[in-house]
Image (cartoon, rainbow, N blue to C red):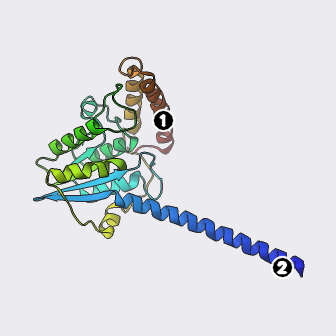
């Protein structure tokens, strides 16, 4: 009898552990979705619409519940007149399309395939006044200036930047006359819903990753002169090489 009770207790304990694991997983999943949707905002000014979607710089082609495919869906569903991304304008002008987080390159190429103009709005310089992978007042103001300059003449704009920039830019957009308006959860879900689940990168991903690697190598010791920025460059090259291998293994569209 005692053995039976012991077995029963163990079974109950096991079931409770499984339930707790499921609850924890689901809670994190729901939290991730809420974070994703919280950083998706809509602004109006006269007849102009601006959609601002925050990305996660650790996201991947197949990460859940937020992936590159969600970004692709947002671009395809919104069909903006222009796409603004977290890349520096001067680097895009030089053909360094991988400037900025990797998801920006992915979205740039997706937009190109849809004949949607892409503009970079980021700003930073590698000096002692700036810290790698961070922001400050000068950068935030420069980003805002680039946004306001590049939305002129477009009725529908989609901005993609790291999610921290979403809240930082909100008061600046409001100061420029843009009003944040109600943006229903249903509308957000529909815009982000993945229609094509095929895991493949757009053509050109690895080409531009390799171009960025070459650029970073040239910067070390020339543009990147401090130990902090040199280390940033080396770490970035390592991450880009890792991304390149994943892209090669997954494949690109033809």
Residue 95, position in %: x, y?
28, 31
Front residue (pair 32, 186): 32
Q: Is residue 56 above or below residue 197?
A: above
Residue 56, position in %: x, y?
41, 49
Which of label 1 and label 2 is nearer to you? 2
Q: Residue, x 62% and y 65% (percent of image)? A: 21
Q: Is residue 220 above or below residue 170?
A: above
Label for residue 5? 2
Marks 1 and 2 in Cβ contact (< 8 Å): no
**C-alpha span from label 1 to label 2:** 53 Å
- Which residue is label 1 attached to? 239
Q: Is residue 109 above or below residue 17?
A: above
Q: Residue, x 16% and y 51% (percent of image)? A: 175
- Answer with the quarter of the image where residue 233 lies: top left
Q: Quadrant of the N terminus?
A: bottom right
- Answer with the quarter of the image where residue 139 lies: top left
Q: Secondary structure at mark 1?
A: helix
Answer yes or no: is residue 48 visible. Answer: yes
Q: Residue, x 33% and y 68% (percent of image)? A: 185
Label for residue 164? none
Q: Secondary structure at mark 2?
A: helix
Asked if residue 124 lies left or right of residue 198, the reply is: left
Answer yes or no: is residue 120 visible. Answer: no
Residue 124, position in %: x, y?
30, 32
Front residue (pair 128, 194): 128
- Answer with the quarter of the image where residue 146 lies: top left
Q: Residue, x 37% and y 25% (percent of image)? A: 215
Residue 82, position in %: x, y?
20, 48
Q: Is residue 110 above or below residue 79?
A: above
């Amino acid at each position: 009898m005692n053995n039976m009770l012991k077995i029963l207790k163990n079974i109950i304990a096991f079931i409770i552990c499984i339930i707790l694991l499921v609850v924890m997983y689901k809670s994190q999943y729901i939290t991730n979705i809420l974070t994703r949707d919280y950083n998706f905002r809509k602004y109006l000014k006269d007849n102009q619409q601006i959609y601002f979607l925050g990305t996660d710089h650790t996201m991947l082609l197949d990460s859940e519940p937020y992936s590159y495919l969600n970004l692709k869906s947002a671009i395809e569903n919104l069909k903006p007149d222009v796409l603004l991304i977290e890349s520096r304008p001067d680097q895009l002008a030089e053909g360094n399309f991988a400037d900025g987080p990797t998801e920006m390159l992915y979205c740039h190429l997706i937009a190109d395939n849809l004949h949607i103009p892409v503009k970079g709005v980021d700003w930073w310089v590698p000096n002692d006044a700036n810290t790698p992978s961070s922001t400050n007042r000068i950068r935030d103001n420069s980003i805002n200036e680039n946004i306001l300059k590049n939305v002129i003449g477009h009725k529908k704009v989609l901005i993609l930047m790291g999610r921290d920039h979403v809240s930082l830019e909100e008061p600046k957009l409001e100061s420029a006359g843009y009003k944040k308006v109600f943006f229903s959860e249903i509308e957000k879900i529909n815009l982000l819903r993945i229609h094509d689940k095929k895991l493949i990168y757009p053509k050109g991903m690895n080409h531009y990753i390799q171009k960025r690697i070459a650029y970073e190598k040239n910067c070390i010791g020339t543009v990147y002169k401090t130990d902090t920025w040199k280390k940033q460059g080396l770490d970035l090259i390592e991450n880009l090489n890792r991304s390149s291998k994943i892209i090669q293994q997954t494949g690109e569209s033809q």
